Image: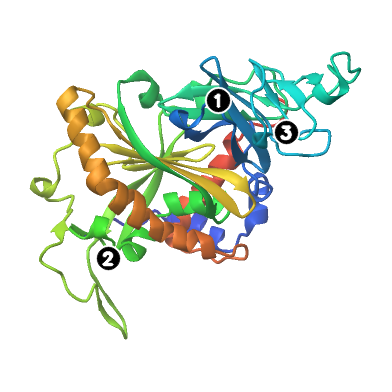
């Protein structure tokens, strides 16, 4: 299939972007520790019990603990001598106690309610507190809102793709903490147009897929303006490069051609996914949620900032067929194959690149229109402080 002529106005925008640097996007440049005032998935709900669990979000250390069935989050630092509270225990219902001197904090407010080693009438009780974070549980995950002290954050559903909270779904996935690289590198990699055709060409997940050499791509917005998507308007399966030769060098018989001109070679799309009427196969929205729609399920991912050099990588694979037998088959597929080949080796190639990136400086090229539009989306839609 030959590509359509590139829009001259779009070409001018892209050429101009080649000469930009990160200062073109000041909010993005300043967001090494992430975008504040959003809900982020942290861990599986099943991982949080009575014993404290530590995590790091947006440069802040937190401790998670469950009490009477509910999960709470506090800053993971006792104000007395700086001891991490995740080393403590629940000595009394509804509280968490520092292991050093017995300073005890209310889980719901973070207020110091007792200093055990200063007796029941300690005058410091009630005068010290640690930060308490809003927490919610959805889709089998614990979500934490990291903001600037707001008492009424937006509903957690505002930061979860709508189809995941309005439909019955089956969720499998993988969470990796301490993944190398700034969260912005991971986000740009996820929505990057050019890399999959080259980096992933020999991945097991792509073994039976014929990947194009290059594509003509347009970036489109969803009807509500929250998502941007990549849409191919021209697909080039092979090409001759002057002075070099043909790429790819040979077509292997086992690769199946995903040719838009051949509907008979396209997998049958689950009608429930088709009914979502998504603007494109690959979409992204703030604070960085990537959505990749396949025929039978949808992949979602978050790059949750931990510090300037690491992020928590949350991958979900979601089936929209909750009936017993399809649910069982989906879970067997995931555990036997998809978890290791897609959420393991395939995205492991991405992790390799994200970990070694060093930007800025950078020099962009035409396919980076996807990266440019993602950065522009952050500038336009980030939630300012003080909401």
Q: Name the residue: 24% across, 72% down.
A: 248
Residue 318: name its quadrant: top left
Q: Which residue is mark 3?
A: 99
| Residue 141 falls left or right of residue 254 | right
- What distance separates the C-alpha of mark 3 from that of mark 1? 15 Å
Callout 3: SS:
loop
Q: Residues within 10 Å of mark 1 (few under 14, many from 20)?
A: some
From this viewpoint, is residue 270 visible?
A: no
Q: Which residue is mark 2?
A: 202
Q: Which residue is mark 1?
A: 50
Residue 304: name its quadrant: top right
- What distance separates the C-alpha of mark 1 from that of mark 2? 45 Å
Residue 96, given in percent of the width and then of the height, sits at 68, 24
Q: Quadrant of the N terminus?
A: bottom left
Asked whether the residues under the numbered discs 3 and 2 touch, taking CB atoms below 8 Å apart as contact, a structural biologist would say: no
Q: Name the residue: 79% across, 39% down.
A: 82
Residue 122, given in percent of the width and then of the height, sits at 89, 18
């Amino acid at each position: 299939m030959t590509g359509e002529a590139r829009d001259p106005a779009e070409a001018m925008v892209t050429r101009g972007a080649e000469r930009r640097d990160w200062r073109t996007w000041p909010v993005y440049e300043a967001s090494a520790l992430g975008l504040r005032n959003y809900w982020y998935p942290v861990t599986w709900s099943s991982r949080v019990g009575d014993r404290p669990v530590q995590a790091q979000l947006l440069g802040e250390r937190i401790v998670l603990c469950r009490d009477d069935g509910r999960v709470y989050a506090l800053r993971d630092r006792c104000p007395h001598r700086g001891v991490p509270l995740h080393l403590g225990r629940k000595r009394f219902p509804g509280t968490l106690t520092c292991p050093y001197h017995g300073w005890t904090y209310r889980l719901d407010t973070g207020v110091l309610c007792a200093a055990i080693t200063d007796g029941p009438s300690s005058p410091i009780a009630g005068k010290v507190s640690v930060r308490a974070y809003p927490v919610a549980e959805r889709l089998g995950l614990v979500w934490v809102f990291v903001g600037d002290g707001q008492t009424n954050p937006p509903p957690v559903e505002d930061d979860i793709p709508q189809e995941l909270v309005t439909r019955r779904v089956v969720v499998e996935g993988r969470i990796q903490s301490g993944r190398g690289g700034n969260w912005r590198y991971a986000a740009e990699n996820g929505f990057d147009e050019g890399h999959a055709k080259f980096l992933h060409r020999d991945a097991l997940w792509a073994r039976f897929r014929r990947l194009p050499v290059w594509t003509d791509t347009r970036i489109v917005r969803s009807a509500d303006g929250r998502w941007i998507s990549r849409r191919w308007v021209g697909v080039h399966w092979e090409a001759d490069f002057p002075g070099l030769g043909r790429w790819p060098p040979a077509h292997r018989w086992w690769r199946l051609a995903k040719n838009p001109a051949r509907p008979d070679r396209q997998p049958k799309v689950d009608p429930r996914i088709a009914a979502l009427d998504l603007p494109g196969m690959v979409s992204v929205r703030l604070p960085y949620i990537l959505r990749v729609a396949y025929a039978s399920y949808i992949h979602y991912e978050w790059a949750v900032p931990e510090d300037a050099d690491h992020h928590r990588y949350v991958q979900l694979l979601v089936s929209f067929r909750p009936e017993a037998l399809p649910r069982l088959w989906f879970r067997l597929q995931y555990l036997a194959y998809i978890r290791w080949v897609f959420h393991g080796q395939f995205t492991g190639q991405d992790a390799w690149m994200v970990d070694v990136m060093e930007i800025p400086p950078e020099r962009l090229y035409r396919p980076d229109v996807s990266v440019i539009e993602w950065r522009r989306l952050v500038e336009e839609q980030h939630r300012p402080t003080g909401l």
